[in-house]
Amino acid sequence: MIDPAVQQRAETVRQFNRFYTKHLGALHEHLHKNQISLTEARVLRELARGRMQTAAELSRSLGLDSGYLSRLLTRFERRDLLIRRPSEADARQSLLTLTAAGHALYDPLDAAALQEVSAVLEQLESGSQEQLIAAMKLIERMLERATHPMPVTLRAPQPGDYGWLVQRQAQLFARRHGWDHTFEGMLARMVADFVQSQDPQREACWIAEQRGTVVGCALLTALPGNIAMMRMLYVEPDVQRLGIGTQLLNECGRFATGAGYVTLAINTASGQLGARRMLDNAGFARISSENVQRFGHALEIERWERAL
């Protein structure tokens, strides 16, 4: 028996698939006129991007059966759409390149697809376009994370990042730990104080980004005694345990050392077992703890520090 909640989510995904497929109709018409299937168009696109690729690389990147792909490439070769030449790195492999005829077939399809997508986007104002693209990037990242490791880059905050981070952390801690709205209020005050009084030489914020979507953050602020305090260290739930928290932690340490701090500090609360393990592995020591009533719960707040 399928859980009703799981079934509802699955139906939502299926509904989205049906909805999105309707928007591909025009592209399919162009493919049909040229007697090209959608899979064949995907292979042509990879080859048209100008990177020499082997059949094995195409099979992995597109998720195609190697036997099926081999037959498809043979048909392309017979139609003079591609050429093969031996790979200098591996004589067992051949490098695939589109011919002029291959480009003549694919380039109009690509142009038609771009025109159709542009027409859809032009119906939306610029802010809505950005929201749509962000949602698409999020779907792509979440569905591909298990099979395609993706690098994470750290950047400075952009407009809208601070508000999003307050919202996401408030949602996460409410769902996982039952913390109430006062936690969101504290985060908002923390961000407001940081933005209004930041000393760029001594304080910083990093946004962790993966495939165009925000997956984490960290703030570094100054405390008396030449102490650098990390705040709002956060990683999205679906990419936790991938080392992103450690990456942010290391960047905080690098910046703090360069700014002349002598100590790097952070506070944790009850239930943050993953954070405690990460800090312990990074050479931090727990120096104090305090039982307090916050965010609707009795919590143990711990102070961790590491000498720089």
Image (cartoon, helix red, strand yellow):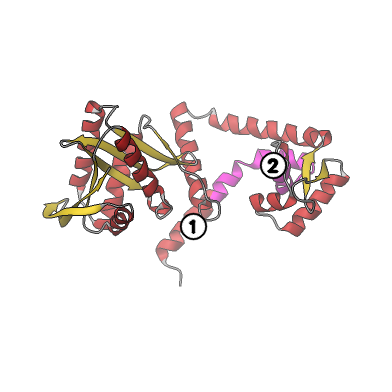
Mark 1, residues whose alpha carbon is within 10 Å: few (<14), some, or many (≥20)? few
Q: Position of residue 159 (x, y in %)?
A: 36, 29
Q: Position of residue 234 (x, y in %)?
A: 33, 46
Residue that carries the numbered disc 2 in the rendered image = 46
Q: Main secondary structure of the magenta part?
A: helix
Q: Front-most of 62 and 119?
A: 62
Amino acid type, label 1: Glu
Q: Secondary structure at mark 1?
A: helix
| Magenta region includes residue 125 | no
Q: Magenta residues, as a range?
A: 17-46
Residue 139 appears left or right of 262 = right
Q: Front-most of 289 and 14?
A: 289
Mark 2, residues whose alpha carbon is within 10 Å: few (<14), some, or many (≥20)? some
Q: How many marks?
A: 2
Residue that carries the numbered disc 1 in the rendered image = 11
Q: Front-most of 297 and 3?
A: 297
Q: Secondary structure at mark 2?
A: helix
Q: Quadrant of the N terminus?
A: bottom left
Residue 248 appears left or right of 109 = left
Tell me which numbered mark, 2 or 1, is placed earlier along the sequence. Answer: 1
> Which residue does the image show at 71% across and 58% down from the upper left?
65
Q: Position of residue 308 (x, y in %)?
A: 28, 42
Which callout, 2 or 1, points to the residue nearer the camera?
2
The dot on residue 145 is none
Q: Front-most of 13 and 189?
A: 189
